Image (spheres, helix red, strand yellow):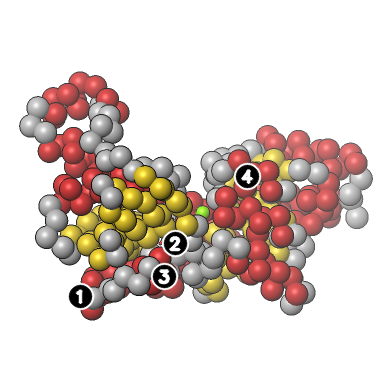
Amino acid sequence: ATPTAVMVATGVGANNGVLIKGGDALEKAQKIKHVIFDKTGTLTQGKATVTTAKVFSGMDRGEFLTLVASAESSSEHPLAKAILEYARHFHFFDEPSATEDAQNHGLESKSFGWLHDVAGFSALPGQGVQCFIGGKKILVGNRKLMMENSVTIADHVEGFVVELEESAKTGILVACDNELIGVVGVADPLKREAAVVIEGLKKMGVNPVMVTGDNWRTAKAVAKEVGITDVRAEVMPSGKADVIRSFQKSGSVVAMVGDGINDSPALAAADVGMAIGAGTDIAIEAADYVLMKSNLEDVITAIDLSRKTLARIR
Ligand code: ADP
Ligand code: MG
């Protein structure tokens, strides 16, 4: 495209909340054959909410929630935020005098004073978190995290997790000193426009793919809801870029749409990286396009804009 065409298209994009970082990105978008979508925070709202918390040890429910929330209190992950929010509500409404206060000041006025002190916190990308609370080792995360710490998952616990996953939820396992003590179920609804956008892309001859670090069962259930048949699940953060490269090797021009720190290598590896505006700074930096409204319809806007700009100057 001529510098003028690029300038005009960049302006049109900006007016629609689509930031295009240069003419190269603009030219490539028309050739996109596959769009790889991250699941959490990209296809889904990234506003996870806890739907169930089940204690499998003798531990008191309030204490269980405090423990899990404390372990997650240093994590930036959407799942961690959901757990903190749930535990905060639990503690708030547990206090008899609190309800009136909630009406007067909003829940925001409630502090996190009930959280335990945490030592030796570490976030394990694609797995969960680990820390020490009151001298006990706490693990919060998926099966992989439990397996690597030799935590046994009893059949009835596994059954409970499978049930959550088959209804598109994520089951988060909790262990104390390598004994499984409970499971937290989290739901993260699809963005309202997600299914329509997937259908739109297919009509444009573009193949949608979903990639996620989440487990296969949840991934498949979410993909089915949104209309995606090509799914790659249980992908470690470093593996998302490999998924992009495998599509490129088979001759495709590939776009990646993502929001997380985890997605930045894939956004950089893709022919066209598109970051969700509400996503992390690192993702935004790695991308060629920024979808400022965080609306997936702008994936189509971006491809359309490229196709039209380049058609006009031919
Ligand atoms: P996605 O690719 O869908 O954004 P991630 O790679 O961030 O997912 O995480 C993959 C999986 O690792 C999650 O589905 C969850 O099971 C586990 N996990 C990661 N971080 C956390 C956390 N802070 N707390 C609990 N589980 C976590
Ligand atoms: Mg994400």
Q: Determine the CA span between mark 1 and mark 4.
A: 40 Å
First-in-chain label (1 vs 4) = 1
Q: Determine the CA span between mark 4 and mark 2.
A: 20 Å
10 Å crowding of disc 4: few (<14), some (14-19), many (20+)? some
Where is residue 244 shown, x and y percent of the image?
A: 67, 67
- As drawn, the residue found furthest toward the top would be 104
Q: Residue at x 48, y 61 (%)?
A: 126
Q: Amino acid at mark 3?
A: Glu
- Nearer the observer, 173 or 215: 173
Res 82 visible: no
Where is residue 52 shown, x and y percent of the image?
A: 23, 57
Q: Residue at x 57, y 50 (%)?
A: 261
* Ligand 1 within 8 Å of the CB at mark 2: yes
Q: Secondary structure at mark 2?
A: loop
First-in-chain label (1 vs 2) = 2
First-in-chain label (2 vs 3) = 2
Mark 2 and 3 residues: CB-CB less than 8 Å, in contact? yes
- Residue marked by disc 3: 148
- Residue marked by disc 1: 156
Q: Secondary structure at mark 1?
A: helix
Mark 1 and 2 residues: CB-CB less than 8 Å, in contact? no
Foreground label between 3 and 4? 3
Instruction: Report how many numbered discs are placed on residues in the image.
Output: 4
* Ligand 1 within 8 Å of the CB at mark 3: no
- Residue marked by disc 2: 127
10 Å crowding of disc 2: few (<14), some (14-19), many (20+)? many
Q: Secondary structure at mark 3?
A: helix
Q: Determine the CA span between mark 3 and mark 1.
A: 20 Å
